[in-house]
Amino acid sequence: MLRKISLLASVLAVIALAPAAAHAAGAKLGGQPTMHAIDTHHATLEFAADKLPRTKSGAVDARVQFAGGQRVSALKPVGRHGYDVRYRATVTSKTALRVDAKYTVRIKLPGSPTVVRLVKLHGAGS
């Protein structure tokens, strides 16, 4: 009887720690980010990733940076893509953004190294 209890306790401990261990591996980007123009100085950046944790203030705990210094709004969850969550941010630039140009984006997800991608700016209608 004692062996069954200790075996059951071990199994329950592994089950309880499995989600924490999976999250400790870090969030992963779920594909190539996309960017669509709103107007000449604004665009929306979207990407899919594992569900990201929140900060104490309730914001999504991730950071997006552009090589050209464009400002990026806070990330907001906007839907799902399979099991991943889709996130969206608005990009604002002092200079005009060029459709069909590629921009270097750095996405820092919690528990993972910074992901660097070239993202093409698509037109507003595509």
Image (tube, grey):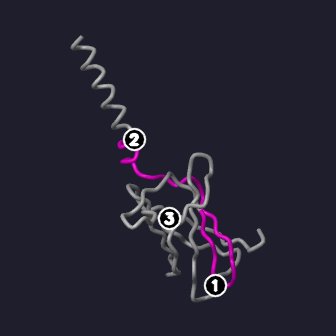
Q: Please name the amino acid that badge 2 sits on.
A: Pro
**What residue sits right under mark 2 in the picture?**
19
For the point 63% across and 84% down, which residue is it? 41
> For residue 116, which numbered disc appears in the image?
3
In the foreground, 57 or 90: 57
Of the numbered discs 3 and 2, the one sitting upstream in the chain is 2
Residue 61 placement (x, y as % from top left): 42, 63
Q: Decide if residue 106 is on the left or right side of residue 38.
A: left
Residue furthest toward the top?
1
**Horizontal and vertical percent position of residue 6:** 24, 20
Q: CA distance from mark 2 to mark 1?
A: 41 Å
Task: Tell me if mark 2 has few (under 14), some (14-19) or many (20+) residues whose alpha carbon lies within 10 angstroms of its own.
Answer: few
Q: Quadrant of residue 39?
A: bottom right
The numbered mark, 2 or 1, whose residue comes first in the sequence reads 2
Q: Is residue 28 above or below residue 103?
A: above
* C-beta proximity under 8 Å, tags 2 and 1: no
User: In front of the other: label 2 or label 1?
Assistant: 2
Residue bounds of the magenta highlight: 19-46
Crowding at mark 1 (Cα within 10 Å: few <14, some 14-19, many 20+): some
Residue at 57 percent of width and 77 percent of height:
91
